[in-house]
Image: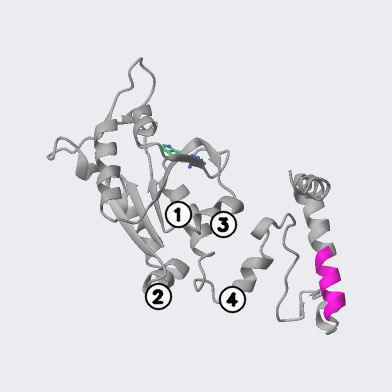
Amino acid sequence: MRFDIVTLFPALFEGYLGEGLLNKAIKNELVDIHRHDLRDFAPDSVHRPVDDKPFGGGPGMLIQVEPTVKCVEAVQAMSPMPARKILLTPGGKRFDQRMAEEFATDQRLILLCGRYEGFDQRVTDIWQPEEISIGDFVLNGGEVAAMVIIEAVIRLIPGVLGDQQSNIDDSFSQGNRLLEFPQYTRPREFRGHTVPDVLTGGDHGAIAKWRAEQSRLRTQARRSDLLVESENDIKNPNA
Ligand SMILES: N#Cc1c(-c2ccc3cc[nH]c3c2)n[nH]c1N
């Protein structure tokens, strides 16, 4: 899978690309990441400005439409692979696991990361990206959101995770509406906190039952909204 990241700060991704899961996926040629600097498409090649004041007044600056559209069209043309076009913005459709599972089936994602007050509206009007937000909070730019999306997507690509089963058990995976059960490892006792006996008893039926109940209790306590969704799905499976 190919990712093209369009940004004013390509260097922000260096640490992220060089570590962990993503770095392994790149080395195993399961993922291919390309970074593109919006400033390379600035009309003035000396100072390379790509922002300007908003018409009608208001705070801050906007990223101009000309360098942006020239950049994303040039990036798109760099590969014949069909690409899903994504613009990160606080006002976008909320990213979730279902969306991650959908994106993981694409050959290529182009992620457009804004800064300042965002992009001139004509970037959306002309390039027609999907506008995506990672949540109801405000960041300073789209780069962190792009990393969130890349991470959520690449872990779904076959071969990236050592054990695909851990994907299936995850909260929210494949329509799973329950939060993950509590997990324990050695030692069996630490500062008076012991591992629940059922987990060390070897009765796999009892373990599965305990884990299901723990997931339900945890979801009830922290995300009862998910239980409502789950009940609705059961009542209206075709909804
Ligand atoms: N996605 C997303 C975002 C953002 C975001 C994205 C782009 C820019 C460009 C300037 N400020 C930005 C904030 N904030 N919160 C989210 N969930």
Camera-near label (4 vs 3) is 3
Q: Amino acid at mark 1?
A: Met
Left or right of 34 in this view: 133: right
Between the C-alphas of marks 2 and 3, the distance is 21 Å
Residue at which label 3 appears: 101
Looking at this view, name the residue that lies furthest to the front.
Answer: 238
Between the C-alphas of marks 3 and 1, the distance is 16 Å
The total number of labels drawn is: 4
Between the C-alphas of marks 4 and 1, the distance is 22 Å
Residue at which label 2 appears: 28
Q: Amino acid at mark 4?
A: Asp
Residue at which label 1 appears: 147
Q: Earlier in the sequence, mark 2 or mark 1?
A: 2
Q: Amino acid at mark 3?
A: Glu
Looking at this view, name the residue that lies furthest to the left.
Answer: 46
Q: Position of residue 178 (x, y in %)?
A: 75, 57
Q: Earlier in the sequence, mark 3 or mark 1?
A: 3
